[in-house]
Image: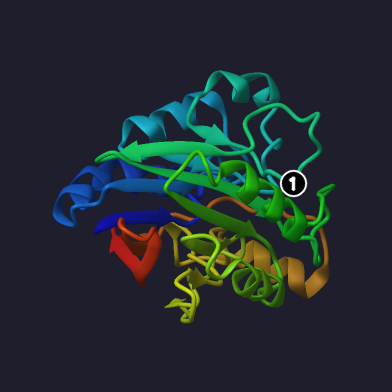
Amino acid sequence: MLKLLFVGDIVGRPGRDIIAARMGRIRSEHAIDFVIANGENAAAGAGINGTIAKSLLDCGIDAITLGDHVWDQRGFETEIGQIEKICRPANLPASCPGWDHLIIEARGFKVAVFTVLGRQFMNTKADCPFLCADRMIQQLRAQADAIIVEIHAEATSEKQALGWYLDGRVTAVVGTHTHVPTADARVLPKGTAFVCDLGMTGPYESVLGREVAPVISKFLDGMPKRFDVATADVRLSGALIEIDASKANAKKIEIFTARA
């Protein structure tokens, strides 16, 4: 049996700080073999840069995935290709820089991971996530023992549909983007672990990681506001998945939370 922790969206400095402070101990205490984390909000709550990506990898994260904020930090398009353990969404145009998947290894077991962007209520130029997943699975099946799919999407229906669509073909389908952990973690009938959203790694005394007051004010009057990253009640959120190495299917998935 192997254990994989998939960490939900890391938000700003608070999210980075709890990763730095807790990840080493978490890996040791829970005997975790693989850690994957979504890092697309790690730089001031929007995007990521090369320096932050490397610091997260140095903290014990094995692979970093990204989402719709992948290009928010100026110049990252020139940095992404120089960082081996970070990948952009696979259903972005092929002309975009960066890797569309990653393969990590522990104890002689190889895990492939890729992200697809949802298209419902998302203002992104992305191909169909279902057809992209088909293509990526076909490509990766011979290269890895297990495949983990992240769907970075707004609509829970789209996330659930992809989970059922891929049941039995991948080890896990996990959702990110909405920053609120969901209570639907389960192993689907054919052995694929699924959860709609991993939640975020950052400040929970907030609105999706941002200071509460300006967000409320924006809803009330519609005027432009600065949404600074909040700082209180910092938590690491994600899902811990147990993988049967002999069959490469999931035996268990549960939401994982740690406080600062």
Looking at the figure, which quarter contains the C terminus? bottom left
Q: Nearer the viewer, residue 244 or 254?
A: 244
Locate residue 205: give its quadrant: bottom left
The spot of residue 41 in percent (x, y) is: 57, 46
Q: How is the image coloured?
A: rainbow
Q: Mark 1 — residue?
A: 91
Q: Is residue 203 left or right of residue 117?
A: left
Q: Nearer the viewer, residue 224 or 161?
A: 161
Looking at the figure, which quarter contains the N terminus? bottom left
- Visible residue check, residue 260: no
| Residue located at (40% from left, 64% from top) | 249
The spot of residue 31 in percent (x, y) is: 18, 53
Q: Is residue 117 left or right of residue 42?
A: right
Q: Is residue 68 left or right of residue 50?
A: right
Vertical position of residue 259 compared to residue 189: above or below:
above
Q: Nearer the viewer, residue 168 or 242?
A: 168
Single out the residue that lies furthest toward the left.
29
Q: Which residue type carries mark 1?
A: Asn
Query: In the rendered picture of this protein, how many numbered marks are placed on residues?
Result: 1
Q: Nearer the viewer, residue 235 or 134?
A: 134
- Visible residue check, residue 90: yes
| Residue located at (39% from left, 33% from top) | 57
Vertical position of residue 156 compared to residue 75: above or below:
below
Q: Residues within 10 Å of mark 1 (few under 14, many from 20)?
A: many
Vertical position of residue 88 compared to residue 226: above or below:
above
| Residue located at (48% from left, 24% from top) | 51
* SS for dot 1: loop
The spot of residue 69 in percent (x, y) is: 68, 45
| Residue located at (76% from left, 56% from top) | 131
The spot of residue 17 in percent (x, y) is: 35, 43
